[in-house]
Image (cartoon, rainbow, N blue to C red):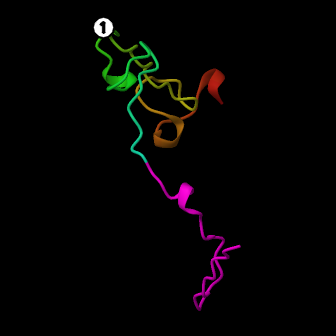
Amino acid sequence: MNVVSRKRDRGRPTNARAKPGYENVSKPRTKFCSICRGRGHKASGCPSYGGVAKKQRKVPKCTKCGLEGHKRNNCSGRMFGVFQ
C-alpha cells in the first residue's frame, strides 16, 4: 500500500488535503444555454431568445415626502400628509 507522506508547512493550519491524481484532473467547462439547451453560448447571448426588450423599472417613490424620483434616504423635503 502506497501512502503519500506530505510534510506539513509551518504557519496557520489549513483544511486543504492532498488530493489523489484522479481529482486533480480539471477540464474546462463548456458553456451551456438554459433557454435553448444549446452548447457554446450562455443564456445571456442566446440567438434563439430574440430581441425581447427588458421591462422598464419603476421610478422610485419617496416614503417620506411622497414624491417620485428619489428614495427616503436621499430625501431633503418635509414630511406631510399620509406619509408621516
Residue at x-position 60% and y-position 70%? 18
Q: Is residue 57 above or below residue 10?
A: above
Identify residue type, mark 1: Gly
Residue 4: x percent and y percent?
63, 77
What's the magenta bit mostly, secondary-structure-wise? loop
Residue 58 lies in quadrant: top left
The residue lying at 51 percent from left, 42 percent from top is 73
Left or right position of 45 against 9: left
Tell me the residue at 49%/34% (across/down). 71
Q: Position of residue 22 (x, y in %)?
A: 55, 55
- Within 10 Å of disc 1 (Cα), the crowding (few <14, some 14-19, many 20+) is few
* Residue under numbered circle 1: 50
**Which percent across, then down, holds residue 23?**
56, 56
Q: Position of residue 60 (x, y in %)?
A: 46, 25
Assess whether residue 54 is covered by the magenta stretch. no
User: Where are the magenta residues, as a range?
Assistant: 1-26
Q: Nearer the viewer, residue 48 or 71?
A: 48
Q: Is residue 72 above or below residue 36?
A: below
Image quarter where the N terminus lies is bottom right
* Quadrant in the picture for the C terminus: top right
